[in-house]
Image: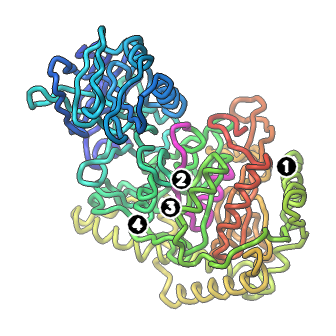
Amino acid sequence: MRAYLRNISQRLAVISLACVLVAATAVVVDIDASGTILRLHDGLPYYIPHLPLMTVDPNKHSGLLAGFTPVTSLRAAYSPITKAYLESQLTMYRTIDDVWSDQFLEALFITYDGQSTGFFDDDAEKWLESIGLTHLYVSNNIRYPILKTLRVSQLTTGPSAGPYITTPSHTSGHLDLHSVYRLHKDDYETFLYGVIPNPDGGWTQTNIVLEGSDVQYIPVPSRVSLLTKALPLSGTRFGLKDIFDAQGVPTGAGSLAYARVHPSADENAPSLQRLLDLGAMMVGKTRTSQFAHGAAPWEYLDIPYSWNPRGDGHLTASASSSGSACAIAGYEWLEFTVGSDTRGSVRKPAAHVGAYGMRPSHGSLDLTGVVTLSEEMDTAGFFSRDPQLFAEIGRTWYLESPVKVKRTTIRFPRKLLYPTEHFPVQNPAAQVLYDNFAAALQKHFKITKVPLNFTEALLPHFPDGDFSEFHRASNTLVEYRSWVSVGKPLVEKHEQLFGGETPKFDPRSKQMFARAASLTEDDFAAAVSLRRAFSDFVAADVLKIDTKSCSDAIFMYDAGTGGIPSYRAEDYNAMLPPTQSLLMAPPAVGGAAPLNFYTAVGSMAGLPEVTVPLGQVEYFSQVSQQVEMLPVAVQLVAHRGCDEILLDLVKKLGVKGVLGAVKTGKETF
């Protein structure tokens, strides 16, 4: 693992504690090929790229700053520029930003964006002299302030709002301004590497490990700086599952061999680019199982499994998007993370970590530049902690979906399909949460629970009236496509480049590829045909289109483990009641559906589905030997193309207080 982090595209930066003092408030910790690591007086680590964001030429050279100096940029649209306005801006910085701090008040850059000439009122000038600045830089359309204790320089314009680090420019009398990134520790080992944007429009990879730590640090940009673009997702930061291409950095897909033979991507995947165009900022690539196969935690060999922050810290986070799920459950410095869902790889991890998660309708996004698992079921999904932000991300990211139902909805569906063979779940305390949620839907939106045996309703429409052929078809769609599109080309290229050496695969990938090698095009075509027939049946007879509510019903189920813990270590699970943690377990005796049958319905029918955290229940930990808390979540499924009705329901349930934001760390609420 360590060799992989060092050699994908650049060397590992191992940081020395031998610091060199270079300025009053900043010390250099280390310098690598792309940037410098600093510590301010607060002791926190920061990263700045070598290339400056801009260079300024103050017209009074006596005001130049020496060394690495933290500074703050403010911009004002109205004059006079008042003390109240300046203080409100800094209060806002303190409130929303984990990069900016009072350490960045060594100097201020203030730019006036209004008409004619701006000026400071008397209280503002007194305030500027009172806060301990060493320098003040103002744009030359601000009337020059006469201050007794503070050096003032004028310049054409300052940088966008936010924190920066300045250094003397190679050009005499000029200052270079550098973007600044807070270094956050990846305690739960969810990231492969961090990234920062580069001048070419792509990304530069970072692998920063401070001495005394065995995990890396991720460089995170200022939220204030990100908010300067007035876009729907401005100010948000996210991690990206490492099956999506990002320009300038490698896509490893959880495989050392795949990373070894594939060069860095030439461009961003369209799905990634859309998020960037909406104003969101990527901070790094998150871990995945090999090729997004649904492996168990103990089957992750090339790239170790991430740590689920919940409970005793040794619970599973389920499927291939587990790295992204663990990151959103662990880190306040992320607003959302991106995963993929083919057979449950967003839905199940979201349920296991107690986060909001979405699998959109199949076909919602262009998946060019994403490592294929099954083109017939692949989707790009995401995780978030806040119901309002969750709804906004889903609404904007999938806004141009070609499969979205265009008609306007005027109400929510009237029926809540409630599978009686699935509920009640194993833990009675978890069942109370499901019952309360169903009652809340009735109370607030008149969505009435309709009990039915879902399995019995569907089985007559499967070949031979049981689940076996359906299960085999789902496996065929994944195994054949993953082998033909990914595995086989990788084997051929690896052997060509490395003297006939065959790449090594994790156990689940090895098994899937071995089975796929015996599949024919006819086998695959038959599976495609079955999937399409099943999708048509579900759309026509189960979750039907409705002129007023888009989907005539919503289906609910539990994609987690029924309020029973599931561990990342195989041995611990043997001590517990049986839980269903695999994505697609074999059929039960007699062809009946296994517990995770409901996840397969959405995958095979191409349906939109959201994971909604409801609460948490107690469990006795096999690790800590004490009572811990386990997340409980519910799945909501609708007719294909009716994604927005689910997103709107989550949003309005949040407004009414039925749903709320989840916390990071051990407990969900």
Q: Residues within 10 Å of mark 3 (few under 14, many from 20)?
A: many
Please tell me in which quadrant of the rendered image residue 399 appears: bottom right
Q: Which residue is mark 4?
A: 270
- Mark-to-mark CA distance, 1 and 2: 33 Å
Q: Residues within 10 Å of mark 2 (few under 14, many from 20)?
A: some
At 84% from the left and 80% from the top, the residue drawn is 457
* Of 287 and 382, the residue lying toward us: 382
Colour style of the rendered protein structure: rainbow
Image: 261 above or below 576: below
Q: Is residue 349 magenta?
A: yes
Q: Earlier in the sequence, mark 4 or mark 1?
A: 4
- Mark-to-mark CA distance, 4 and 1: 39 Å
- Mark-to-mark CA distance, 4 and 2: 31 Å
Residue type at the position of mark 4: Pro
Residue type at the position of mark 3: Ala
Q: Nearer the viewer, mark 1 or mark 3?
A: 1
Q: Which numbered disc covers residue 433?
A: 1
Q: Nearer the viewer, mark 4 or mark 2?
A: 4
Q: Earlier in the sequence, mark 3 or mark 4?
A: 4
* Of 612 and 276, the residue lying toward us: 276
40 to the left or right of 609? left
Q: Which residue is mark 2?
A: 299
At 57% from the left and 44% from the top, the residue drawn is 328
Residue type at the position of mark 1: Leu
**Where residue 528 appears, x then y in whole percent?**
57, 85
